[in-house]
Image (cartoon, rainbow, N blue to C red):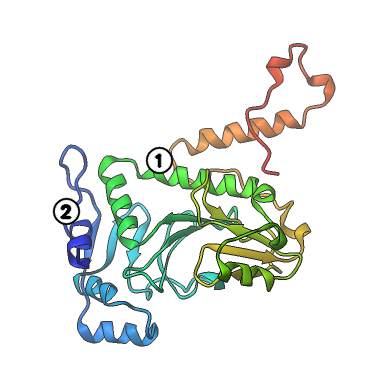
Amino acid sequence: MSTADTMTPLVSAPWVDADGNPLPERALPGLRPEVIHGLECSFPGIISPAHKALLEICCGLAETELGSIDFTGCFFPEEPCPVFQPCLTLAIDDAGRRWIAELGEKALPGPIWCVFPDPKVAVYVSDDLAAFMATLRGCACRGETLQWLQNLSDEARIVWTQRHAFAQRPYQLRDPDEKVRGWLAGLPFDAYVYDVRTPKIARGWPYGLAGPSARLYRCARLPVFAVVGSASEGWRQKFSATIPPTYREATARADVVDLAARRKRRTPRSIPANPRQGLASGTSDE
C-alpha cells in the first residue's frame, strides 16, 4: 500500500467524534516541490520517497491535543539528545514533552518517541509516523486522548522508578546479534545498558539517570542505549509527582501525592493504634 493510501485517510479526512460531530483537528496543506527540495538539502539522503510523497499531501496538523504537529522538522527546535539524531521534532506539548520521529531506514519517519522532561525518560510510542497518526486520530475520535497521555506518563514513571532494575552492565548481556556484541565490548566498563527492543511493562529509556554530565551511547539505530556518568547525580534524582494540568483530575492526584508524603513524615507517636489506618497509598520514586 502506498504512502498516499496509508496516510491520506489519517490526515485529510475530517476528524469526528463518536456522535459524528466535527473535531477541531485539521490537516495543513502540502508543500510545493521547491520547498520539499529545500528540506532535502537540510536532511541529505534521509528524506525518503514516501516521506516526500506525504509532504506533497500534508505538511502537518493543527489544533490537536498535542498542539501543532509538524512533518517537516522546521517548526520546532532540533532534538538535543544526540542519540536520536537525525530526527523530526513533531510537537512540543504544553507539558514540555517532545514528540520526535527518527529519520533513517524506514519509509516513513519512525520510530516515534515521547521525550519527557520530568522524569527524564524517553518512552517508545509507535513504530512509524503512520502508526502514530492512527493512534492519535483514533484516540481523538473516541475521546480517549487524555487517557492515552496518562498511560504514557505512567510508563515514564515506571521506567524511572525501576531504572535500577532495568539497567544492565555490558558484561551481563549475551546478545545473539554480532553487531550488538561488538558494541557492548566497546562500551566503558561502568556503563549502564538499556535494551528497549522487546515490549515490556514499560518500554522506555531513562536518559537522565546519570545527571547532566552523562555520556550517552546507542548501538547504531537500534533501540539499545547506554549511559555512563556519575551514578550519584541520577540514581537518587527525584522528579515532580504533580500530574501536568493537561490531565483530568490533576488537582485530585496532586492532593493524593501530598497526603502520602505527609503521612510518610509523621513521627511514631502520631501513628494510630490500628495499623490499617496509617497506610499511605503512594509509592516512593526511589
In the picture, measured across the screen, residue 175 lies left or right of residue 147, that is right
The x, y position of residue 167, in whole percent, is: 67, 54
Can you name the residue that lies furthest to the top here?
Answer: 274
Q: Toward the viewer: 239 or 199?
A: 199
Which residue shows up at 15% across the image and 41% down it?
Answer: 20
Report the residue at 27% width, 40% height from top.
142
Q: Please say if 183 is above or below 156.
A: below
Image location (x, y in percent) of residue 270 = 80, 20
Callout 2 amino acid: Pro
Residue 147 got which mark?
1
Where 213 sits versus 149, above or below? below
Which of the pair 206/142 is nearer the observer? 206
| In the foreground, 281 or 96 | 281
Residue sitting at 51 percent across and 57 percent down?
197
Q: Which mark is residue 75?
A: none
Q: How far across and how far down the image is residue 88, in percent?
A: 41, 71
Question: Amino acid under label 1?
Answer: Gln
